[in-house]
Amino acid sequence: MSEQFLELLKFLFLGLLYVFFIWIVIMSLFQLRKPKKKRRASQKKQIVDSQTSITSLLTIEPQEAQGTEYLLKEEIFLGRDDECEVTINDSFTSHRHARIFLDENSPYLEDLTSTNGTFVNGEKIEKPYLLQQRDRIQIGNTVLEAK
Protein backbone atom coordinates (compact mmCIF):
# COMPACT_ATOMS: atom_id res chain seq x y z
CA MET A 1 0.00 0.00 0.00
CA SER A 2 1.20 3.43 -0.81
CA GLU A 3 2.15 5.87 1.86
CA GLN A 4 -0.44 8.42 0.63
CA PHE A 5 -3.24 5.86 0.94
CA LEU A 6 -2.22 5.10 4.54
CA GLU A 7 -2.18 8.82 5.38
CA LEU A 8 -5.67 9.16 3.86
CA LEU A 9 -6.94 6.20 5.94
CA LYS A 10 -5.42 7.73 9.07
CA PHE A 11 -7.22 11.05 8.51
CA LEU A 12 -10.53 9.30 7.70
CA PHE A 13 -10.26 7.29 10.91
CA LEU A 14 -9.44 10.45 12.90
CA GLY A 15 -12.40 12.27 11.31
CA LEU A 16 -14.76 9.40 12.18
CA LEU A 17 -13.44 9.43 15.73
CA TYR A 18 -14.19 13.18 16.06
CA VAL A 19 -17.68 12.70 14.62
CA PHE A 20 -18.30 9.90 17.13
CA PHE A 21 -17.22 12.06 20.10
CA ILE A 22 -19.32 15.01 18.92
CA TRP A 23 -22.32 12.67 18.58
CA ILE A 24 -21.78 11.42 22.17
CA VAL A 25 -21.67 15.00 23.51
CA ILE A 26 -24.85 16.00 21.63
CA MET A 27 -26.75 12.91 22.81
CA SER A 28 -25.60 13.52 26.40
CA LEU A 29 -26.90 17.09 26.26
CA PHE A 30 -30.27 15.87 24.96
CA GLN A 31 -30.46 13.37 27.81
CA LEU A 32 -29.67 16.04 30.43
CA ARG A 33 -32.37 18.40 29.21
CA LYS A 34 -35.70 17.89 30.91
CA PRO A 35 -38.43 18.06 28.32
CA LYS A 36 -41.66 19.72 29.36
CA LYS A 37 -44.10 17.00 30.29
CA LYS A 38 -47.26 16.90 28.27
CA ARG A 39 -50.46 16.34 30.16
CA ARG A 40 -52.66 13.51 29.12
CA ALA A 41 -56.40 13.97 28.73
CA SER A 42 -57.03 11.97 31.91
CA GLN A 43 -54.71 14.26 33.87
CA LYS A 44 -56.45 17.35 32.47
CA LYS A 45 -59.81 15.92 33.47
CA GLN A 46 -58.48 15.22 36.97
CA ILE A 47 -57.26 18.80 37.23
CA VAL A 48 -60.62 20.19 36.15
CA ASP A 49 -62.45 17.87 38.56
CA SER A 50 -60.21 18.81 41.46
CA GLN A 51 -60.61 22.53 40.83
CA THR A 52 -63.70 22.84 42.90
CA SER A 53 -62.18 26.21 43.77
CA ILE A 54 -59.87 25.94 46.67
CA THR A 55 -59.92 29.52 47.91
CA SER A 56 -58.49 29.28 51.41
CA LEU A 57 -56.63 27.32 54.05
CA LEU A 58 -58.23 26.69 57.44
CA THR A 59 -56.07 26.01 60.50
CA ILE A 60 -57.08 22.77 62.22
CA GLU A 61 -54.19 22.40 64.71
CA PRO A 62 -52.73 23.68 67.05
CA GLN A 63 -55.68 24.45 69.30
CA GLU A 64 -54.74 28.12 69.89
CA ALA A 65 -54.73 28.87 66.13
CA GLN A 66 -57.72 26.69 65.23
CA GLY A 67 -60.21 28.37 62.91
CA THR A 68 -57.74 30.86 61.40
CA GLU A 69 -58.39 31.16 57.68
CA TYR A 70 -55.91 32.25 55.02
CA LEU A 71 -57.09 33.27 51.55
CA LEU A 72 -55.14 31.90 48.60
CA LYS A 73 -53.50 34.23 46.08
CA GLU A 74 -51.34 33.68 42.99
CA GLU A 75 -48.49 32.62 45.29
CA ILE A 76 -48.27 32.41 49.07
CA PHE A 77 -45.46 31.27 51.34
CA LEU A 78 -45.81 29.26 54.54
CA GLY A 79 -43.17 29.35 57.28
CA ARG A 80 -41.78 31.06 60.39
CA ASP A 81 -40.62 34.18 58.55
CA ASP A 82 -42.71 37.28 59.29
CA GLU A 83 -42.88 37.99 55.54
CA CYS A 84 -44.71 34.69 54.88
CA GLU A 85 -48.43 35.06 54.21
CA VAL A 86 -49.08 32.07 56.49
CA THR A 87 -46.85 32.49 59.54
CA ILE A 88 -46.36 29.31 61.55
CA ASN A 89 -44.70 29.74 64.95
CA ASP A 90 -43.28 26.26 65.35
CA SER A 91 -39.69 25.14 65.96
CA PHE A 92 -40.16 22.32 63.40
CA THR A 93 -40.96 24.84 60.66
CA SER A 94 -38.35 26.44 58.39
CA HIS A 95 -38.32 30.19 57.77
CA ARG A 96 -39.66 29.64 54.24
CA HIS A 97 -40.98 26.12 54.55
CA ALA A 98 -43.40 25.74 51.62
CA ARG A 99 -45.32 27.67 49.02
CA ILE A 100 -48.67 27.39 47.30
CA PHE A 101 -48.83 28.65 43.73
CA LEU A 102 -51.32 28.60 40.89
CA ASP A 103 -50.47 26.85 37.63
CA GLU A 104 -53.21 27.05 35.01
CA ASN A 105 -55.64 28.02 37.82
CA SER A 106 -54.79 24.86 39.78
CA PRO A 107 -53.27 25.27 43.27
CA TYR A 108 -50.02 23.37 43.88
CA LEU A 109 -48.18 22.93 47.19
CA GLU A 110 -44.39 22.78 47.01
CA ASP A 111 -41.92 22.02 49.80
CA LEU A 112 -39.03 24.48 49.67
CA THR A 113 -36.37 21.92 50.72
CA SER A 114 -37.35 22.23 54.37
CA THR A 115 -35.54 20.22 57.02
CA ASN A 116 -38.58 18.40 58.41
CA GLY A 117 -40.64 18.16 55.23
CA THR A 118 -44.20 19.00 54.23
CA PHE A 119 -46.95 16.39 54.44
CA VAL A 120 -50.28 16.15 52.63
CA ASN A 121 -52.80 13.70 54.05
CA GLY A 122 -50.00 12.06 56.06
CA GLU A 123 -47.60 11.56 53.13
CA LYS A 124 -44.40 13.53 52.61
CA ILE A 125 -44.31 15.43 49.33
CA GLU A 126 -41.13 15.58 47.24
CA LYS A 127 -42.41 17.57 44.25
CA PRO A 128 -45.23 20.07 43.64
CA TYR A 129 -48.52 18.51 44.73
CA LEU A 130 -51.89 19.36 43.19
CA LEU A 131 -54.13 20.41 46.08
CA GLN A 132 -57.72 19.24 46.23
CA GLN A 133 -60.65 20.06 48.49
CA ARG A 134 -60.21 18.83 52.07
CA ASP A 135 -56.51 17.98 51.67
CA ARG A 136 -54.74 18.24 55.02
CA ILE A 137 -51.36 19.97 54.97
CA GLN A 138 -49.02 19.35 57.89
CA ILE A 139 -46.03 21.57 58.53
CA GLY A 140 -44.37 20.82 61.85
CA ASN A 141 -47.16 20.54 64.41
CA THR A 142 -49.52 22.74 62.37
CA VAL A 143 -52.29 21.22 60.26
CA LEU A 144 -54.15 23.24 57.61
CA GLU A 145 -57.09 22.11 55.49
CA ALA A 146 -57.69 23.21 51.90
CA LYS A 147 -61.17 24.76 51.54
Image: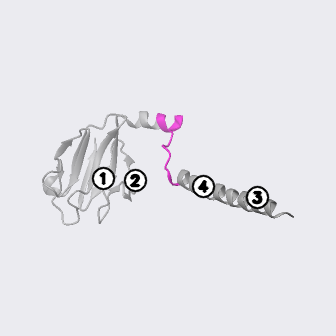
Q: Which structural element holds mark 4? A: helix
Residue under label 1:
137
Quarter residue 53 falls in: top left
The quadrant the N terminus occupies is: bottom right
In the image, what residue occupies the spot 22% across and 46% down? 58
- Spatial distance from mark 3 to mark 1, Cα to Cα? 69 Å
- In this view, the mark in front (4 or 1): 4
Q: Is residue 46 left or right of residue 17?
A: left
Q: Residue furthest front?
A: 3
* Circles 1 and 2: CB atoms closer than 8 Å: no
What residue type is disc 2 on?
Lys
What residue type is disc 4 on?
Ile
Residue under label 4:
22
The quadrant the C terminus occupies is: top left
- Spatial distance from mark 4 to mark 2, Cα to Cα? 34 Å
User: Sequence-wise, which precedes: disc 3 or disc 4?
Assistant: 3
* Crowd around label 3: few <14 · some 14–19 · many ≥20 (10 Å): few
- Is residue 40 magenta-colored? yes
Q: Is residue 135 visible?
A: no
What residue type is disc 1 on?
Ile
Span shown in magenta: 32-45
